[in-house]
């Protein structure tokens, strides 16, 4: 956190432009030939891609530098990949995630004091300082003499973190991520709630690593994290005049989906007799109605109608306790 050392932890934009521009024409031609960049791309386009991918690290909220390891590897290989992540495993973060039993894919921008960011207590590790000290978060702006707002530094970190956590969230299931995303997009575009519910159910069943507790927050958190990792435009805990809702998902400027999640505790028996299955169906319908009633009188159309062509309100109900794909609904 020493301000005199901020510029020497990576390459500043001035250093990047001063030392490395001579390498860029060959890199541009290679990426065009491989189809990694559009045929009409020029050097300004490539520079913008490199900056977006590797720039953004800061320890004061003002001076920003490019990740030196990733930049050098990109120049050497001529490819813009997550080079820094390939140099080491992130298993420690996954282990921490399991221990915390909470989702960390896209938390709100944390505000931390300098003392908290620098603290290292092996007996009481905190998630945000850990992410900051290991390079997954950096300083966005300085709010006061001892207060900072953090954010992810760049595209390299976001993409690699999301992909690794997506693998974790989906457990051991062999999932075609592209097909999963296409299936969800199709369900949203034609307002197919049955197909969307099937996708959400699959996501819960695939998540074999976490023990989902009887908590309303964990279910939408898991769905939100997977949607975020699948590159959907999603936000959570957005405030309206009345209250908050769980997830806002948008498809460009065309349509906004406001999701309200509810969960009812009902632990079915293995084998699920017809009587138990009937109880689950009845409880699911009750929970859906509860979620619908909760969002019915909230003025989401007025809040988002001017920005999006269509605003859809989606009630989602979870019933029972799902364990390894059995029980629940």
Image (cartoon, rainbow, N blue to C red):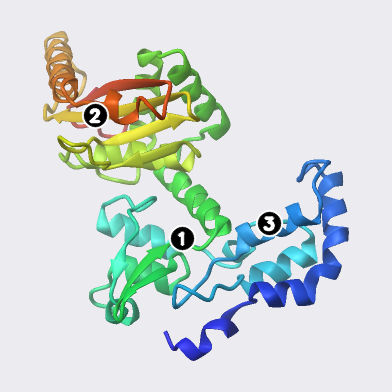
On residue 24, the disc is none
Query: Of helix, strand and loop, which one carries label 3?
Result: helix
Question: Which quarter shows the N terminus?
Answer: bottom left
**Whether residue 326 can be seen here:** no
Residue furthest front as drawn:
306
Earlier sequence position, callout 3 versus callout 1: 3
Q: Which residue is mark 2?
A: 260
Q: Nearer the viewer, mark 3 or mark 1?
A: 3
**Distance Cα–Cα, label 3 vs label 1:** 18 Å
In percent of the image, x 46 and y 87: which residue is there?
Answer: 3
Question: Which quarter shows the C terminus?
Answer: top left
**Distance Cα–Cα, label 1 vs label 2:** 27 Å
Height in image: 223 above or below 270?
below
Height in image: 167 above or below 258?
below
Height in image: 12 above or below 303?
below
**Distance Cα–Cα, label 2 vs label 3:** 38 Å
Q: Nearer the viewer, mark 2 or mark 3?
A: 3
Where is residue 301 shown, x and y percent of the image? 29, 23
In percent of the image, x 72 and y 67: which residue is there?
Answer: 73
Q: Which residue is mark 1?
A: 152
Q: Which residue is mark 3?
A: 48
Earlier sequence position, callout 2 versus callout 3: 3
Earlier sequence position, callout 1 versus callout 2: 1
Callout 3 crowding tier (Cα within 10 Å): few <14, some 14–19, many ≥20: few
């Amino acid at each position: 956190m020493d301000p005199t050392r901020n510029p020497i932890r990576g390459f500043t934009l001035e250093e990047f432009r001063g030392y490395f521009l001579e390498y860029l024409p060959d890199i541009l031609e290679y990426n065009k030939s491989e189809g990694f960049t559009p045929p009409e791309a020029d050097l300004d386009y490539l520079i913008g891609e490199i900056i977006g991918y590797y720039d953004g690290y800061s320890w004061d909220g003002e001076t920003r530098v490019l990740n030196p390891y990733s930049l050098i590897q990109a120049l050497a290989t001529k490819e813009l990949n997550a080079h820094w992540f390939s140099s080491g495993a992130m298993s420690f973060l996954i282990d921490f995630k399991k221990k915390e039993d909470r989702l960390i894919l896209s938390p709100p921008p944390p505000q931390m004091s300098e003392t908290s960011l620098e603290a290292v207590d092996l007996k009481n590790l905190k998630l945000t300082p850990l992410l900051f000290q290991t390079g997954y978060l950096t300083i966005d702006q300085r709010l006061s003499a001892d207060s900072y707002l953090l954010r992810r530094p760049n595209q390299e970190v976001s993409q690699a973190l999301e992909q690794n956590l997506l693998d974790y969230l989906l457990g051991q299931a062999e999932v075609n991520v592209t097909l999963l995303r296409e299936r969800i997009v199709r369900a949203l575009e034609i307002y197919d709630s049955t197909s969307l519910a099937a996708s959400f159910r699959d996501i819960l069943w695939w998540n074999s690593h976490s023990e989902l507790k009887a908590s309303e927050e964990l279910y939408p958190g898991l769905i939100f994290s997977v949607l975020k990792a699948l590159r959907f435009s999603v936000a959570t805990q957005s405030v309206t005049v009345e209250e908050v809702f769980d997830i806002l998902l948008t498809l460009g400027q065309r349509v906004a989906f406001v999701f309200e999640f509810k969960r009812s505790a009902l632990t079915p028996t293995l084998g699920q007799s017809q009587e138990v299955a009937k109880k689950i169906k009845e409880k699911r319908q009750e929970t859906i109605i509860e979620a619908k009633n909760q969002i019915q009188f909230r003025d989401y159309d007025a809040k988002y109608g001017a920005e999006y062509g269509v605003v859809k309100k989606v009630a989602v109900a979870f019933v029972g306790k799902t364990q390894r794909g059995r029980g629940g609904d």
